[in-house]
Image: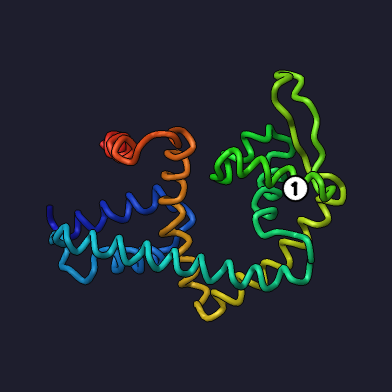
């Protein structure tokens, strides 16, 4: 494939996945993904694997640091656990949902997630009722107090976000969002539909969808 054709093809693919992205976003994305190689050359598999491991380790480390900052700022709200924020945010997104669906959406084990929801309910931040469509299931929604607390949590935890990423320039933040959003969407859907499968089955299914 001629270099110019390859470049146009890469732009078309990027634009279809990131319709709001600018030419500058694409250029940054392309340069990062090409790893400095001439157009048409493919890096060896070992290099890709090393990069995957390095990226995964970096994201995990940043997440661990963010948790430390988040728990530090939550000292301003005694009695509130960090995990409550993720559950309450998901409940707010769905407005009212089955407890089991909320737990699945935040990727917790059911027993652990239900225990967290029960603690949030005990604190008066969510309300619970029988599901009229299934008497065995329970529906939850934020209580008026829970709605107020969630707003406060958003404001507080934004301090932890800013603490971690304040030194990144705006265009770099936007570029990272564009780069990672597509990966997050693909794997979020994959896990949501196949969370009880083994990794090899997930890999096979993912590769099949890419064909």
The local secondary structure at tag 1 comes to: helix
Q: Quadrant of the C terminus?
A: top left
Which of the 4 quarters of the picture holds residue 34? Answer: bottom left
Which of the 4 quarters of the picture holds residue 179? Answer: bottom left
User: Horizontal placement of 9 versus 175: left or right?
Assistant: left
Which of the 4 quarters of the picture holds residue 51? Answer: bottom left
Q: In the rendered view, would you say 52 is above or below 106?
A: below
**Residue topped by disc 1:** 119
Q: Residue at x 68, y 50 (%)?
A: 89
From the viewer's side, name the closer residue of 9 and 200.
200
Crowding around mark 1 (Cα neighbors within 10 Å: few <14, some 14 to 19, many 20+) is some
Residue 109 place in picture, x, y as percent: 55, 42
Q: In the rendered view, would you say 204 is above or below 74?
A: above
* Residue found at the very far right of the displayed protein: 144
Q: Residue at x 75, y 60 (%)?
A: 80
Q: Which residue is drawn at 44% across and 53% down?
A: 18
Q: In the rendered view, would you say 67 is above or below 45?
A: below
From the viewer's side, name the closer residue of 39 and 91.
91
Residue 58 place in picture, x, y as percent: 40, 68
């Amino acid at each position: 494939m001629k270099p110019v054709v390859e470049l146009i093809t890469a732009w078309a693919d990027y634009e279809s996945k990131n319709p709001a992205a600018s030419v500058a976003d694409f250029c940054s994305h392309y340069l990062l993904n090409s790893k400095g190689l001439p157009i048409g050359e493919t890096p060896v598999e070992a290099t890709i694997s090393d990069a995957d491991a390095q990226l995964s380790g970096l994201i995990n480390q940043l997440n661990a640091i963010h948790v430390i900052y988040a728990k530090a700022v939550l000292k301003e709200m005694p009695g509130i656990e960090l995990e409550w924020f993720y559950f309450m945010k998901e409940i707010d997104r769905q407005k009212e949902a089955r407890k089991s669906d909320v737990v699945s959406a935040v990727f917790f084990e059911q027993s652990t997630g239900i225990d967290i929801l029960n603690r949030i309910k005990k604190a008066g931040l969510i309300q619970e009722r029988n599901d009229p469509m299934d008497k065995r299931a329970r529906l939850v929604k934020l209580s008026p107090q829970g709605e107020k607390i969630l707003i406060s949590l958003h404001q507080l935890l934004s301090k932890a976000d800013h603490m971690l990423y304040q030194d990144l320039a705006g265009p770099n933040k936007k570029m990272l969002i564009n780069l990672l959003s597509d990966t997050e969407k693909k794997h979020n859907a994959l896990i949501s539909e196949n969370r009880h499968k083994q990794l090899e089955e997930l890999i096979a299914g993912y590769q099949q969808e890419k064909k």
